[in-house]
Image (cartoon, rainbow, N blue to C red):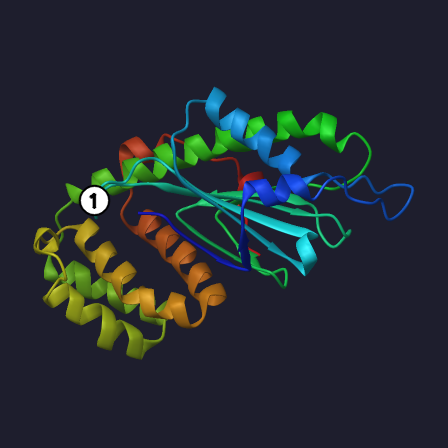
């Protein structure tokens, strides 16, 4: 299931609409209303037939900065897949409007964020006119990313691995410096030996992937920014080490891949 963390004050769409038109801070500054940006995103999601199972709104800096999180896809159980998507807007020239998506997203009011795929548009002339095309492109890429990650997870569920292969992958993770040795040995390895859920007791790539994500929950709660980036890079390492033919045929252009 997708994970998204937003460190900001929660609000509502009604409150965002009540904020009215933002003030321009210069001749080349054309700030967008938060609700107008979100209306375009919502309409595009509807047109492309994406199911939104959860949506939450957040603000910071007195409402000048807005963050809206989406969960796309209807994940009904532990093994169901969903995609996280976030839309951010800033009316104070600090950053461009962003659309980001992936399986792990983190956004903080201080400007930090992480996501597998990110699109941006500055608040300059013609931004509002160009936004529908940019959003359409971003949502389309979200759909491709969703299908690709779903294909990987389904393939991993059918890919059996030996104990030696599991240990070899854990060793590679430690040697890469991606995760601390103590975390891999003390948190991940015990979950491989004794999984939290009965259905994860099979010796598959998916079960090993689940052991990593389960063990990572505490790291995400305690230090979400680096922990979210670790999960993104860990997923990439899994995809490189355990390719799935169906997923490899779904390509995301390099220009959309970003962690910041």
As drawn, 121 above or below 179:
above
Q: Quadrant of the C terminus?
A: bottom right
Residue shown at the point (17%, 54%) measured from the top left? 207
Number of marks: 1
As drawn, 208 above or below 246:
below
Crowding at dot 1, Cα within 10 Å, few <14 / some 14-19 / many 20+, comes out as few
Q: Looking at the picture, tell me which residue is in the foreground, 147 or 122.
A: 122
The x and y percentages for residue 233 are 42, 57
Q: Looking at the picture, tell me which residue is in the foreground, 136 or 151.
A: 136
Relative side of 74 to 199, left or right: right
Residue 177 visible: no
Q: Residue furthest right?
A: 27
The x and y percentages for residue 26 are 90, 46
Element type where label 1 sits in the image:
loop
Q: Residue furthest top?
A: 47
Residue shown at the point (27%, 47%) measured from the top left? 242
The x and y percentages for residue 127 are 75, 33
Residue 24, quarter of the rendered image? top right
As drawn, 25 above or below 154:
below
The x and y percentages for residue 47 are 49, 20
Residue 145, quarter of the rendered image? top left
Relative side of 30 to 231, left or right: right
Where does label 1 land, which residue? 77
Residue shown at the point (39%, 58%) measured from the top left? 231
Residue shown at the point (77%, 52%) measured from the top left? 92
Relative side of 41 to 222, left or right: right
């Amino acid at each position: 299931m997708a994970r998204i963390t937003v460190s900001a004050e929660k609000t509502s769409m009604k409150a965002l609409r009540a904020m009215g038109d933002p003030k321009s801070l210069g001749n080349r500054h054309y700030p967008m209303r938060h609700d107008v940006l979100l209306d375009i995103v919502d309409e595009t999601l509807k047109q492309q037939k994406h199911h939104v199972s959860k949506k939450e709104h957040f603000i910071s800096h007195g409402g000048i900065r807005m963050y809206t999180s989406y969960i796309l896809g209807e994940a009904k159980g532990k093994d169901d897949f969903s995609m996280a998507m976030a839309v951010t807007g800033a009316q104070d020239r600090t950053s461009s409007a962003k659309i980001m998506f992936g399986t792990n997203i983190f956004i903080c009011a201080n400007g930090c964020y992480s996501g597998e795929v990110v699109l941006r548009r500055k608040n300059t002339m013609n931004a509002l006119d160009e936004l529908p095309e940019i959003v359409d492109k971003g949502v389309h890429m979200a759909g491709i990313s969703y299908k690709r990650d779903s294909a990987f997870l389904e393939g991993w569920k059918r890919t059996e691995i030996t104990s030696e292969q599991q240990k070899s992958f854990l060793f590679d993770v430690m040697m890469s410096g991606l995760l601390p040795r103590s975390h891999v040995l003390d948190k991940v390895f015990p979950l491989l030996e004794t999984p939290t859920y009965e259905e994860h007791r099979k010796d598959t790539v998916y079960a090993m992937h689940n052991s990593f994500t389960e063990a990572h929950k505490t790291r995400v709660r305690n230090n979400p920014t680096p922990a979210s980036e670790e999960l993104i890079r860990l997923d990439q390492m899994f995809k490189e080490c355990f390719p799935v033919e169906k997923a490899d045929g779904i390509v995301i252009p390099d220009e959309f891949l970003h962690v910041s």
